[in-house]
Amino acid sequence: MNPDRVLESFLEMVAIESPSWHEAPMAAYCAEKLAEMGFSVSFDASAAETGSDTGNLIAHLPGTVPGRVAFSAHLDTVKPCAGIEAVIEQRHICDEVTCRMAEVVCSAGDTILSADDKAGIAAIFEGVRSVVESGALRPDITVLLTTCEEQSLLGSSALTDDALAWPADLPAASRGTAAAGLLDDVAVAAEPVPLFVLDADGAPGTIIMGAPYHWTLRARIKGRAAHAGVEPEEGVSAIQIASAAVAAMPLGRIDECTTANVGRIEGGVAVNIVPAACELEGECRSLYEDRVLAQRDAMTAALEDAAAQLGGTVEVAWELDYPAVVHEPGDAIVAHLEAAARAAGLASRHAVSGGGADANVLAAKGADAITLGIGMTNFHSVDEYIEVADLRAMARYVEAIIAEYARN
């Protein structure tokens, strides 16, 4: 692993503006770099569905030994991301382990840094590049870079179910294993590919063991308009119905793995008119399906009860944005990650996330998907930063993961 190159690569990526739906320049940059490493690069047709100016990038590099791994990160960032000025500085850092002086990359203060998720991409690229340059054994490698992840995982959700399948016209070290007395080619193709999504906070070595189901609520409440000063008795306030419903809902942290929120209420046309309509949006999340469905039903019941009691009506619509992904400590993919972490000189740590990542979607598209912490801190804010040591550690981790799967 080249410690200077991974930092230089990250700084190059940070300078490329790539908000959701406008990832094309970043995608073009990544396609060029992957092609230089020997990958076969393609883009899917998801732009028509997502509205992005590019599709998801899917790249494959034939291995030298049987086996296969995949790495993923996302191309898009949140805003403000125009004209990011990256700054490298010494900073006093305190975490759960220690307080220390550390070299960090941050923004000048007016924008995000976009370590979420360009640090993930930079680490993938450097780890793979180091393996290729060293001539070390490697399994077949797939790199997936998605669009619109910051928009409820739109890009990964638009992938076809067979998007991660190895191209039939591309050589693969995993093919021909039957001749070697191993699994037959059909069995190899049917096995879920281990896929590592570099897109979480937490120091390198952090393994996200669970991420929740996510349901989004959209409700339209109808009341009856009336003059608020002349005949308020003739009106039914849609906003009052919404308020009563929200007050009756269990919200916030419901239990150790379930949360709920109402994040938007909009209605009314003037202060002197009893509002006839109101729209409400919210969400609920949980690692467990029975709990998230119970929370969803409780929020629906609160809306329906409030509307009935106050003389209005409500139309409730729920949409499953993505399912949960949960791993157990004894899972093979976790054991491989722990071994790779030891080889890279990192301490493994298991964590559970309250947010989703592309792994939630990719687990249903032919992948044994798991999310890894990359060290990004204060992401989605102008205070975002990443330690240079963490960026380099993640590149070593990627290199070690490839080596681990080459041996097994």
Image (cartoon, rainbow, N blue to C red):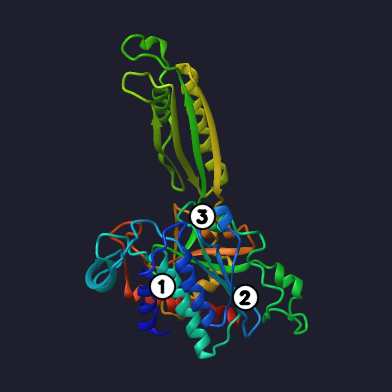
Which residue bears the numbered disc 2?
A: 68
Q: Residue at x 77, y 80 (%)?
A: 178
The label shown at residue 153 is: 3
Q: Residue at x 45, y 57 (%)?
A: 20
List x then y, in percent, for residue 288: 54, 47
What amino acid is at disc 1? Answer: Ala
Q: Nearer the viewer, mark 2 or mark 3?
A: 3
What amino acid is at disc 3? Answer: Leu
Q: Nearer the viewer, residue 282 or 81?
A: 81
In this image, 178 relative to 7: left or right?
Answer: right
The label shown at residue 347 is: 1
| Figure quadrant of residue 143 | bottom right
In this image, 137 relative to 238: left or right?
Answer: right
Q: Residues within 10 Å of mark 2 (few under 14, many from 20)?
A: many
What amino acid is at disc 2? Answer: Arg
In this image, 334 relative to 393: left or right?
Answer: right
Compare marks 2 and 1 and give the one earlier in the sequence: 2
Q: Quadrant of the C terminus?
A: bottom right
Q: How far apart are the two marked residues, 2 and 1, measured between alpha carbons?
A: 24 Å
List x then y, in percent, for residue 391: 37, 74
Disc 1 element: loop
Q: Quadrant of the N terminus?
A: bottom left
